[in-house]
């Protein structure tokens, strides 16, 4: 056994230091309430003991399908305390993907709300492997136990007890969103989670007593480990772009939120509403936005609601490794946005201290072993590769995907991000798009983000997406354009002409001569920000003249 590490160890420590501090707040009209650190610690201990009593202990893979609220946090920490392995799948990925993910994970237990259990039973999710069923709420025809019964079974729990797990023991299986390929189960070990908490704490100077409003549930799970109060917003986390801005702004102001997490789509929606009304979020010192590049104008608009010394931070990373690098709104708005608008890509900042990042030559094949000869020179676009304690080593039950994404380097494993980028002469990393989405014409290779950024400067454009139509190596570059909602169809010809003029001004975009307008881009469920370029390419293909 390696050194004992368990992410749940943080909870009894924090409960001893600040027992009466509020850990979780749900400021909703229905199902609202709060938990102090002492209450969260005691409840998670009872749940852990109860789970162990029904066979959900060390190493038992357990699906957790419970929405954000007063049950999710005690359950998550209860599972970690018991040494079980939570299986976390975003319910928004669709029923087909959900069934495939759960079949792949081979869970032995399922904890969920009635709606999740009904779907599991009717659609046969992981039917061959699930033996233990626990319902959070009213149990119906599927049998098993309720969460209340589990807590009763654990009434004799030791409030300080946490399972003895090693740094390399599996802590959780977290599925990717599937926005740029099939969803894959990322194997997190306890050392990965511990390193992630430390990296996030240090990168954003998070201290106990801070108040966080996280609009993405997974980002919130480790708030208690950082000593923060979590304010759970009343929203559908699978549709951040459609959030009611008042349900974000009001709890921020009411609870004195100091930190918030929001996807680029959520910042856009809330920022538009708030900036139009002169809203000020005086308590907020740090906004964190991830999941896709955040357009500079979205940052500028949201920044206008913050005080001068507050900043929007845009960490770069992925489910397999987070955070990798980070930068702030002050650097973006004062400097890098100008280069972005001219096609330099999106600056994601310097790598965090625990990460070693490299850029290697673009290659779609597996790379078995690391060699420094793979690296390209600074300024040259290649694939971003990272190594560090928060970098995961493999996918669960997916050897082919692991071979494509991982490079062995002695005792460590380097992760291929699948993203393209480069280092500038100041050691900052610039993101240029997904490797799988580059467009290869007969004359050149085009990278999505540097091209789209040029066209995104048009004031009537909401966003653009570069896709390739045709055979690889002879693709026709097509610019798909989603306009601002107030722009009428009668303006299309004028805007197309203006976009072509914009593109003609840069060497890397002057070959893009086909422009199509799309009513609403397909986007990922998790963040509503990653564009479904594959779907757009299929939509555009019949429109391209041979």
Image (cartoon, rainbow, N blue to C red):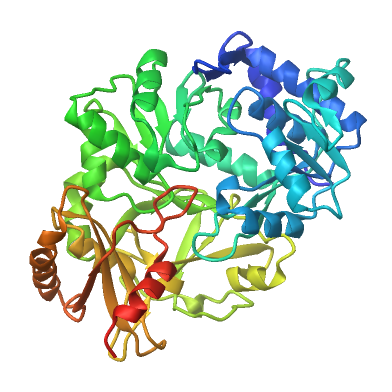
**Which residue occupies the foreground of this view, 241 or 430?**
241
Which of the 4 image quadrants contains residue 6?
A: top right
Residue 269 placement, left or right of 458: right
Say if 19 sits above or below 206 in the image.
Answer: above
Q: Is residue 42 visible?
A: yes
Which of the 4 image quadrants contains residue 85?
A: top right
Residue 141: x percent and y percent?
A: 83, 35
Say if 441 sits above or below 197 in the image.
Answer: below
Residue 448: x percent and y percent?
A: 32, 69
**Which residue occupies the foreground of this view, 374 or 216?**
216
Tell me the residue at 44%/78% (across/down).
361
Count of numbered circles in the view: 0
Residue 313 placement, left or right of 118: left
**Which residue occupies the foreground of this view, 210 or 281?**
281
Q: For the C terminus, which image quadrant?
A: bottom left
**Which residue occupies the foreground of this view, 205 or 68?**
68
Residue 23: x percent and y percent?
A: 58, 18
Residue extending farthest to the top is 20
Q: Is residue 382 visible?
A: no
Say if 130 sits above or below 203 in the image.
Answer: below
Tell me the residue at 81%/28% (across/down).
48
Say if 378 sits above or below 222 in the image.
Answer: below
Residue 125: x percent and y percent?
A: 75, 52
Residue 113 placement, left or right of 298: right
Tell me the residue at 18%/79% (across/down).
513
Residue 153 placement, left or right of 140: right
């Amino acid at each position: 056994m390696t050194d004992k590490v368990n992410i749940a160890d943080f909870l009894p420590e924090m409960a001893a230091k600040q027992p009466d501090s509020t850990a979780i707040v749900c400021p909703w009209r229905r199902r609202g309430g709060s938990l102090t650190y002492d209450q969260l610690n005691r409840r998670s201990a009872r749940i852990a003991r109860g789970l162990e009593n029904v066979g959900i202990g060390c190493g038992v893979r357990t699906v957790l399908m419970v929405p954000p609220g007063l049950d999710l946090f005690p359950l998550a920490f209860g599972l970690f305390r018991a040494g079980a392995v939570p299986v976390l799948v975003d319910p928004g990925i669709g029923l087909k993907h959900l069934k495939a993910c759960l079949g792949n994970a081979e869970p032995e237990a399922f904890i969920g709300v009635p709606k999740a259990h009904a779907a599991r039973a009717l659609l046969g999710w992981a039917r061959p492997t699930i033996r233990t069923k626990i319902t959070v709420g009213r149990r119906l025809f599927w049998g098993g136990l309720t969460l209340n019964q589990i807590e009763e079974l654990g009434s004799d729990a030791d409030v300080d007890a946490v399972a003895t797990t090693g740094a390399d023991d599996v802590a959780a299986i977290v599925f990717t969103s599937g926005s740029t390929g099939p969803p894959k189960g990322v194997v997190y070990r306890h050392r990965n989670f511990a390193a992630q908490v430390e990296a996030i704490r240090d990168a954003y100077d998070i201290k106990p007593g801070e108040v966080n409003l996280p609009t993405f549930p997974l980002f919130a799970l480790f708030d208690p480990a950082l000593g923060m109060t979590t304010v759970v917003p009343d929203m559908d986390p699978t549709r951040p772009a459609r959030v009611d801005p008042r349900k974000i702004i009001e709890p921020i102001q009411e609870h004195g939120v100091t930190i918030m997490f929001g996807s680029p789509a959520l910042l856009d929606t809330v920022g538009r509403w708030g900036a139009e009304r002169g809203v000020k979020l005086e308590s907020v010192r740090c906004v964190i936005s991830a999941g896709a590049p955040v357009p500079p104008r979205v940052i500028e608009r949201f920044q206008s609601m913050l005080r001068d010394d507050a900043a929007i931070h845009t960490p770069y990373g992925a489910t397999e490794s987070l955070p990798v690098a980070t930068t702030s709104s002050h650097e973006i708005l004062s400097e890098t946005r100008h280069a972005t608008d001219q096609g330099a890509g999106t600056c994601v900042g310097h790598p965090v201290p625990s990460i070693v990042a490299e850029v290697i030559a673009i290659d779609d094949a597996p790379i078995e072993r690391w060699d420094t000869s793979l690296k390209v020179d600074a300024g040259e676009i290649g694939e971003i590769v990272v190594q560090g304690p928060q970098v995961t080593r493999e996918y669960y039950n997916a050897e082919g995907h692991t071979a494509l994404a991982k490079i062995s380097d002695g005792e460590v494993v380097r992760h291929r991000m699948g993203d393209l980028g480069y280092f500038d002469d100041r050691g900052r990393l610039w993101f240029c798009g997904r490797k799988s989405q580059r467009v290869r014409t007969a004359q050149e290779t085009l990278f999505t983000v540097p091209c789209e950024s040029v066209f995104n400067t048009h004031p009537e454009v909401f966003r653009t997406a570069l896709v390739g139509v045709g055979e690889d190596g002879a693709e026709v570059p097509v610019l798909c354009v989603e306009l601002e909602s107030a722009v009428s169809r009668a303006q299309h010809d004028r805007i197309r002409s203006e976009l072509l003029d914009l593109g003609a001004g840069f060497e890397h975009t002057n070959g893009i001569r086909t422009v199509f307008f799309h009513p609403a881009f397909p986007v990922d469920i998790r963040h509503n920000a990653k564009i479904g370029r594959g779907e757009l390419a299929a939509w555009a293909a019949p429109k391209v003249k041979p």
